[in-house]
Amino acid sequence: MARIRFRDVRHAYPPPKGQEPVYALNEINQVWEDGGAYALLGPSGCGKTTLLNIISGLLTPSEGEILFDGKEVTDLPTSARQIAQVFQFPVVYDTMSVFDNLAFPLRNRGMDEKLVQQRVEQIAEMLDLTDNLKKRASGLTADGKQKISLGRGLVRSDVNAILFDEPLTVIDPHLKWQLRSKLKELHQQVGVTMIYVTHDQVEALTFAEKVVVMYEGTVVQVGTPVELFNHPRHTFVGYFIGSPGMNVLPCSIDGGQPVFGKNLLNIESRIKGQLQGKLEVGIRPEFVEFADDGIPVRIEKVEDLGRYQVLTLTHEAEIIKMVMAEDQTVPSENPKIQFDPHHTKVYCDDWVVEEAVNE
């Protein structure tokens, strides 16, 4: 297991002749703790697989250093990093039995056969593969084969980290929840550093203790699921985390308070100083409520999703999403809303504005 540190890490792929390099990964200075469960979350092309490949040694960064437990490994090959990696598609030896597939990494390192037997049986029990140990891998379903891939990563006790590159892509939707829960359970049992790449927020928030949200090659926030939901530092985090995502609305500042349309909004602490750039206010749909006196809106749509309702509202040309309990009543005329001041955030050029801005 390893504590992983990124020191000024950046990466640009070779550009076409005569063009300036475009960085696929902007500067990262992070420390990921030993034994942690991390998810790299973001849309396609945001740099998460590039970062994963830098950790594994499949890619050497253009700039910066990566350290495992204080030892620099930037130029070390994958084989010297003690890394296990599970890919999108199951990598198994179809002609071998499940047992031999799981035993392969251990036998390859010359482990005593008695110890191999013990370790394989232990991992097979964790993954519910015990009844299949004597079967050929070719006879298993896609999720069974992916369990073998997971098992080959877990069977070694000498790994610094296990890397998962969207490992549930080929798994049937009804089995994904089971495997996500199994991965979380396995992490708690073995305590090895795990890093999981996905574009699915449900997978990330289910599996990880800390989620690393990436956008256009930049790590925009690292935090627990609760931190990302309650305190998004970037508008992308607010939009990408949650369903529906955070409302991001244009605003101006008057007397340290945001103004949306012609409506002065209350916030927890007033903004001090001058802001230059694109100004927006962010509020999650869960923290929007009807009020006797507030922002006048028009109700465009009400969706009943069982335990709650999602309302689509408009104020002038802006769309506002609102979440309310199923037993709450929707006003029949002249609806008005207000934003919870404790959860109303101001953003400048997409980054959250701290309450105190230098004069």
Image (cartoon, rainbow, N blue to C red):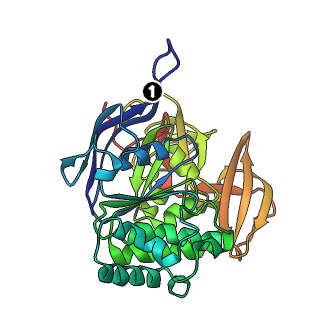
Location of residue 92 (image quadrant)? bottom right
| Position above or below: 271 against 310 | above
State the image coordinates of residue 212 (x, y, percent, origin top left): 43, 52
Q: Is residue 178 left or right of residue 56?
A: right
Three-letter code, disc 1: Gln
The residue at the point 46 percent across, 57 percent down is 228
State the image coordinates of residue 188 (x, y, percent, origin top left): 37, 76
Question: Considering depth in this image, is 327 or 65 the residue closer to the camera?
Answer: 65
Is residue 265 visible from the viewing direction of this image? no
Q: Quadrant of the C terminus?
A: top left
| Position above or below: 155 against 271 | below
Residue that mark 1 sits on = 276
Question: Considering depth in this image, is 244 or 195 the residue closer to the camera?
Answer: 195
Is residue 75 visible from the viewing direction of this image? yes
Secondary element at tag 1: loop
The residue at the point 25 percent across, 57 percent down is 3
Label total for image: 1
State the image coordinates of residue 259 (x, y, percent, origin top left): 55, 40
Location of residue 189 (image quadrant)? bottom left
Location of residue 1 (image quadrant)? bottom left
State the image coordinates of residue 121 (x, y, percent, origin top left): 41, 84
Label 1 CA crowd tier, 10 Å (few <14, some 14–19, many 20+)? few
The residue at the point 40 percent across, 40 percent down is 59
| Position above or below: 59 against 288 | above
